[in-house]
Amino acid sequence: MSGAAGSNPHRSFRYTPGSSANTFERLFSVVVTHTYYTQEAGLCRDLCFAPDGATAKLMTSLGLLFKAERTGFSVLVQRSAVAGLADYLRRQARDGAGLPEYWSRLTFLMTMDNPLFIGITALPIDTKPTAVNLYGNNMSAHVEGETAVLPPGSFMDAGALYPVVGAELSLTVPPDARIVTLADISGTIVHRYRIGHRGGTGDRQITIDLGQFTHGFYTIDIRGALHQPVRTGDYPRSVLYVPTRPLTMGVLDFLFTRPTPEAGGVYPLPPLTGSGPVTLPAKPPVYRLPFDARSTYWQYYVVSQDPAGDLEHLSIKDMTAVGKGTSFRQHSHPVRLPDGASAILFEAQDALPLRQKSPQKFRLTGQRRDSNHHVNDILVSRLPVAPPSPVWPAPDTGQSGGSLSDGQVSRSPATDGLSEIFVYV
């Protein structure tokens, strides 16, 4: 088998020498990239993937094979099973506006293999996988170079986060709601839950059992007694139905082929027209799941190694040659650290992206007057850069031109964070 995802997307896999029926072709691959990682073209090993239960059974029945890889995964298909796969898709087709619609898909659950993933990624800093997960599908995929970028934009970001629900879906509905509908990604209603009439004008709490449904993306809506929409601020709303264990970080759907003639996206199989044979494309799609690194405001706490000494004439100069730099503002008064030590605080005026190997270079100069009144020059030619952890929430404050401590630096508080760096001189 091959190495990292996307390293050789056209290779075949032969499990029984001499038997073409047992030759596997790559149907599609998924590779994860992250701008935090500056090695190996940004390939990211922080996430793991697995088919959900229903998808695993479907893949077995269709002669498909899931192959986990270091930076993603691949789905393989037996060469002899392609005709049967096409027949299955045609049997499962739904009646559309004059043409059949092909919504059959594979669903994969995404989990974190690196607990620092959320901290280094440009997602809302309060993101909790128990509350929200990422979602993507290949209907929004678009070709960039040799890969198909899965999200509609450049990265998987806050717009890809949806609330998660378990097998017991608890809802609050208004008193005039009579029907709760559950629709899948095609917009087809897969379940209607009827609410019995009850007197009163207050909201009601109901629970719907989702155990009979496959995991994935659903849209919940409510209707009145005459099937008319009941519009409230909470409906319609989209959710991700995920298992309780393992703790998921996301759900990915891959449709086999273009579901409707007008649908965008990139698909493993060509459009199914007529009843003719289907052949695999010469270059199976490699979907790229890209993430951007979080930017943080760096705070340098400069501490004298002589507790009785004083630090004087300190200055941080930006020596960055490549990439984004910034200036630092010195806090007007020393700050007291939890261990009782006194520190001089320097605050970055711009958020800087976290990097595995950061290009940022800042030089510290100044003097230390020790307890014997001796003066020693200070020179740290390259200050340490922000670590991947811990990352703290950045204060949500107003105008630019000031400091974090006095609430004057502008930022995007949803994704920007705060990095503390301690320097002893």
Image (cartoon, grey):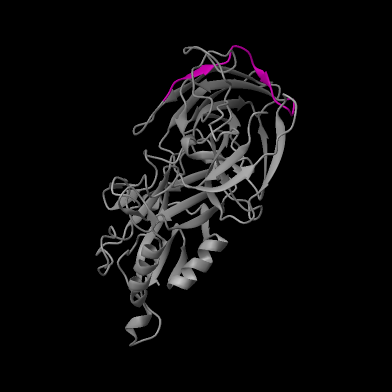
Locate residue 387 relative to residue 337 in the image: left or right: left
Residue 425 visible in the shown view: no
Q: How many labels does the image show?
A: 0
Pick the front one: 398 or 172: 172
Outermost residue to the bottom = 18
Pick the front one: 373 or 14: 14
- Point out residue 49 in the picture as x, y percentages from the top left corner: 51, 57
Residue 304 part of the magenta-drawn span:
no
Residue 336 part of the magenta-drawn span:
yes
- Point out residue 1 in the picture as x, y percentages from the top left corner: 40, 72
Pick the front one: 25 or 101: 101
Residue at image location 63% in from the left, 32% down from the top: 177
- Point out residue 24 in the picture as x, y percentages from the top left corner: 37, 74
Magenta: predominant secondary structure element?
loop
| Highlighted magenta segment, given as a residue range | 326-340
**Above or below, 3 relative to 325:** below
Which of the 4 quarters of the picture holds residue 172?
top right
Locate residue 87 relative to residue 162 in the image: left or right: left
Q: Quadrant of the C terminus?
A: top right
Locate residue 206 relative to residue 72 in the image: left or right: right
- Point out residue 325 in the picture as x, y percentages from the top left corner: 40, 27
**Above or below, 19 relative to 122:** below
Residue 170 visible in the shown view: yes
Residue at image location 33% in from the left, 88% down from the top: 18
